[in-house]
Image: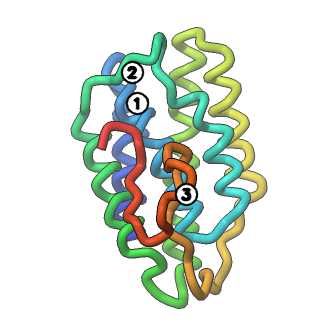
């Protein structure tokens, strides 16, 4: 699951670099990918990077981007990752590969937003990418009892046992 999520993130980054005009969906899906990876890996630094990246994911005027194959693949891989939770006791290598692919994706979005002259979004993505590059470590022992993936749209008081799905176009 980690490998598929990493491959999907790499494909989304390639799409953003190769075809910026149709990259909005992949950039939007990256927000949920970061949030889910942070929850599954139990990594507060990755969670902070997800918070920072959130602004970069937004499209102008609140428009929902047209779905793309890369965005759909990333959403599907991350959904499976969220549903599976922590897959085993040793997620260090697979977690590092996933974080590396997400870093590449966030950097591609930062470059895209800079080229689009969206300075605030570019800065948010660059800050998240820098955090990922300099501060993320993956614990060799994942959380014993991983918490459900919590996303900002969850209503207050929602039951912890309720399945949560990321908000970006699922």
The circle on residue 157 is 3
Which residue sits furthest front?
157
Foreground residue, 138 or 36? 36
CB under 8 Å between discs 2 and 3: no
Which residue is the site of mark 1?
16
List x then y, in percent, for residue 157: 55, 57
Which residue is the site of mark 2?
20
Quarter of the C terminus within the rendering: top left
Foreground residue, 163 or 143? 163
Q: In this rendering, is residue 92 above or below 101?
A: below
Residue at (56, 25) in percent of width and height:
111
Residue at (54, 87) in percent of width and height:
90
Quarter of the N terminus within the rendering: bottom left
Splitting the image into 4 quarters, where does residue 77 fall? bottom left
Residue at (43, 39) in percent of width and height:
13
Question: Is residue 23 in sight in this rendering?
Answer: yes
The circle on residue 146 is none
Task: Kindly report which numbered mark, 3 or 1, lies closer to the viewer in this rendering.
Answer: 3
Left or right side of 3 for 130: right
Local packing at callout 3 (Cα closer than 10 Å; few below 14, some 14-19, many 20+) is: few
Local packing at callout 1 (Cα closer than 10 Å; few below 14, some 14-19, many 20+) is: many
Q: CA distance from mark 2 to mark 3?
A: 40 Å
Q: Earlier in the sequence, mark 2 or mark 3?
A: 2
């Amino acid at each position: 699951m980690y490998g598929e999520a990493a491959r999907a993130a790499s494909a989304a980054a390639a799409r953003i670099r190769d075809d910026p005009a149709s990259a909005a969906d992949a950039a939007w899906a990256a927000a949920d990918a970061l949030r889910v990876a942070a929850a599954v890996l139990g990594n507060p630094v990755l969670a902070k990077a997800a918070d920072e990246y959130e602004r970069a994911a937004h499209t102008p005027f609140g428009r929902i981007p047209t779905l793309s194959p890369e965005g759909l693949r990333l959403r599907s891989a991350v959904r499976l990752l969220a549903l599976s939770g922590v897959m085993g006791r040793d997620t260090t290598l697979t977690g590092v590969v996933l974080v590396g692919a997400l870093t590449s994706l966030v950097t591609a979005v930062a470059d895209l937003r800079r080229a689009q002259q969206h300075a605030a979004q570019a800065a948010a993505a660059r800050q998240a990418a820098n955090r990922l590059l300099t501060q993320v470590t993956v614990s060799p022992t994942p959380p014993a009892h991983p918490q459900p993936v919590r996303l900002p749209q969850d209503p207050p008081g929602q039951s912890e046992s309720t399945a949560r799905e990321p908000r970006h176009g699922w």
